[in-house]
Image (spheres, coloured by chain):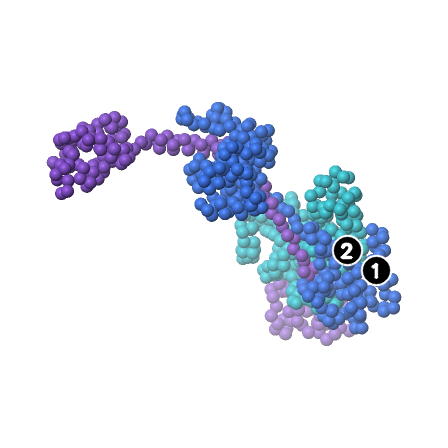
Chain colours: A cyan, B blue, C purple
Amino acid sequence: MQEETAEMPDAPEDEISHVPDHGEAMRIAEALLFASASPLGAAELAGRLPEGADVEKILQDLESLYALRGVNLVRVAGKWAFRTASDLSFVLARNVVEQRRLSRAAMETLAIIAYHQPVTRAEIEEIRGVATSKGTVDTLLETGWIRLRGRRKAPGRPVTYGTTPGFLEHFGLDAIEDLPGLEELKGAGFIEGRVPSDFSVPVPSDADALREDEDPLDQDDFLQPLDMHRTEAGEE
Amino acid sequence: MQEETAEMPDAPEDEISHVPDHGEAMRIAEALLFASASPLGAAELAGRLPEGADVEKILQDLESLYALRGVNLVRVAGKWAFRTASDLSFVLARNVVEQRRLSRAAMETLAIIAYHQPVTRAEIEEIRGVATSKGTVDTLLETGWIRLRGRRKAPGRPVTYGTTPGFLEHFGLDAIEDLPGLEELKGAGFIEGRVPSDFSVPVPSDADALREDEDPLDQDDFLQPLDMHRTEAGEE
Amino acid sequence: MAKPLPFEDVERTERSESEPALLVDVDGFEGPLDLLLELARRQKVDLHRISILALAEQYITFIEEARRMRLELAADYLVMAAWLAYLKSRLLLPEPPKGEEPSAEELATALALRLRRLEAIREAAKKMGERAWLGRDVFARGAPEPVIVNRDSRYEASLYDLLKAYAQQRQIQFNARVSLHKRNVWSLVDAREALERLVGHLSDWVTLDTYLVEYMVEPAMRSTVMASALSATLEMVREGKLTVRQDEAFAPVWVKPADPAAAGV
C-alpha cells in the first residue's frame, strides 16, 4: 500500500495514508460529477480517482445517497450525471427561457428514427404514410439528436439516420434499448409481417459501427451535411 | 460510509419532525441552487419555495448537509451557490500530455549543446552560422534535456549550457561520452565526403563540476532561470 | 393526436354511438394513413380486430363528402380512396382462384398492420414526449465548474534525428569555412609599410608593379595587393612623400620620392 501511495503524484500527502479512503474517493467523484455539465463515464472517473478506488461501488453509493434528494445521480447514455429530480420539474420549469417545441411530425419522425435506426427517409415516409418535409429532418439535425449514419447499400444509396448520445442524454436514457415501449412496438408488427425485409431490424441500434447493409458516408457528406441533405431532397 | 450516511440528515422523513414540508422544501431549494447559473439569494429562493417555508432554516440545513461532502453550499456575495469543496480543487485540474516534435533549429541547437558542452549561446550561433532564437533555447529548457551550467569567465559572463541526465535517459545513452565521434559518424554515413583536416568532433562532457573557464551561476539564475534568460537575450 | 378530431358521420351505418357534430377538415390530418387511423379509432375496437371493409367505406364516404363540399384534397387522399374502393370490391366479391397477386384478405391484413405500426410509433412518440426532458423537466448543473487543463508538452526526438542534425550542421559549417579560410588580404597597413620601405631607397621613377612583384607570388593575392598599394600610394602623395604619374589609362603607374623642394606644393 505504501508503494501505491508513493506512486500517486496528485494525492494530498496526509489524505491517503493507507487504503484509498472510500469516503474521500466518494467526495472526489461527487465533486467531479457536480462540476461537469456533461455526463462522465466510469472509466473517465476512474482515471481521476485515487488509485485502487472502487468506482462501481462509489457510483452505487452516491446514487443511493442522492436517490431521495432534490438532485439525483442518474445514468444517461452509459455515463453518469447529476440531474435535478424529475418530480420537481413543476418548480424548475419556470427556469426555462424558451423550450423549443417539436411539431407532431418532428416528434414522430424522431421516434421512428430512434426505434428503427438505421433508417432512411423513404422508410420513415412509408411508416408515416406521408412525405417528410426537408424542414422536419433539418430541425432534428439541428437539435443534435439525430445524425447521418451512412448510406444504405441500395439503389440511390439513400442516407441512413440514427440517434446520437445527445439524444439519450436529452431523454434521460441510459441506452437505446431503454426506449419506452420497445416491446409493444415489436408486438405491433415492427419485425414480422409484411414489412419489407430490408427495413425490419430486430432492435434499434445507435452503435457507431455500420450495419451490413450500410456504406460509410461519402466525403462530401461530412463537408456539408445539411447541403447534402438538401440535394437528397431535391432528387425526390 | 455507513457512519457518514447516518450523520447526514438526508432522509426527508426523519428531518421533518414538525413542519411537514421542510424536507420537500429542502429538495426544491437544492434543485434550484443546483440548476441555477448564478448564486441565488434567500429572497429569490423564498419566492420559489412552498409558501411558509423557512428559507433560513433550509439554507442552514443544506449547508450543514453538504459541509463534509465533495460539494459545499457556500455564500457568495450574500447569495448561495454549490461549489466544489475547496480542498478538492485539485481534482478539477487535469494534466494533458501533448506529444510534440522538436523543430529543426531546436534539434540542431540541442545537438550542438550535447557535443560542445559547456557551450554559450554565442558559440552555438557561431557553429550554426545563424542566430538562435530565445524561443528555441526556452523550448529546450522546457524539455528538461538541457540546463544552465554556469557562466563563462569572459566579457559579458555568458551562461553556459549543458545536457541533463534526462537527456541521456531520453536518447538511451549510458553516458554522454557514448555520443558517436567523428569516425563513427562517418562510418554510419552521417558525415560524407572529404573532411577538412582541422575538422573535429569534440568529446563531450556533462560532468557537474564546472570547467576552469566557468563560474557558478548567479543567485538570480536559480530564482528565475527563464527570466534571466530573457534578460540575457535582451542584452544582445 | 389524442384530441378528438371532429368529423361528420355521414354514413351512420356502422356507428351506433352518437358522434360529435362533424366537420370535414382534412387539414387536421397528416396524410391518408393518419386519417385512416383516426377513422379506425372510431370503430372503438382493438386495431387487431378492425373491420377493414367498414374502414374503407368510412374513408370513401369522408372523401366524397369533402369533394361534395369542394374542398381541395391532396392527391394522396384520392389515391388512397381509389385503392380502398378497389379493395372493398375485392373483399365483397368472391375470391378468384389463387393468382400471383396477393388476395384481398392479405391486402386488408397488410393495411391493418400498417395502421397498427403507425399507432405504435405514435404511442412511442407520445411516451418520449412525456419523458423528463433535459432542459425542460430536469436540469443539469447551471454553473458547471470548468476543468482547468494544464498542458504538459512531451517532446519526442530520436538519437538518429539528433546525430543527423549535428552532422548536417557541422558539415555545412566546414564546407562554408574552407573558402573563407583561404582568403588572405594585403591590408592598407601592410601596403603602407611596404611603400615606406620603398621610399627609403628610391631615387628615381620606378613602376609600382615592379616593386610589388614580390608580394604577388600568389595570383590570388594580386587584386588585393594592387588595390591596397594604390590606396596607400595616393595617401602618401597627399602627404607629400611620393610623386606618382601615369602616362595613359591602364599604363603602368610610376612612383618616386617627392622632391623635398616641391613638398609644400
Q: Residue flagged by tag 2: what amino acid is it?
A: Arg
Which quarter of the image is occupied by the C terminus of chain C? top left
Residue B74 can be seen, yes or no: yes
Residue C226 can be seen, yes or no: no
Look at 51% across and 32% down and name the residue there: B212
Q: Report how far apart the C-alphas of labels 2 and 1 lie in the structure.
A: 13 Å
Q: How far across and down, in percent of the image, does residue B12 sit?
A: 84, 62
Task: Say which quarter of the image contains residue C180.
Answer: top left
Circle 2 residue: B69
The numbered mark at residue B9 is 1
Task: Say which quarter of the image contains residue C224.
Answer: top left
Q: Chain of mark 1?
A: B
The local crowd at label 2, few if under 14, some if 14 to 19, many if 20 or more residues have their Cα within 10 Å, is many
Q: Is residue A139 above or below residue A56?
A: below
Q: How far across and down, in percent of the image, does residue C132 sit?
A: 73, 61
Look at 43% across and 27% down and name the residue there: B199
Determine the secondary structure under disc 1: loop
Tell me whether the residue at label 2 lies in contact with that at label 1, contact meaning CB atoms closer than 8 angstroms. Answer: no
Q: Is residue B50 above or below residue C138?
A: below
Q: How far across and down, in percent of the image, does residue C56 sit?
A: 70, 63
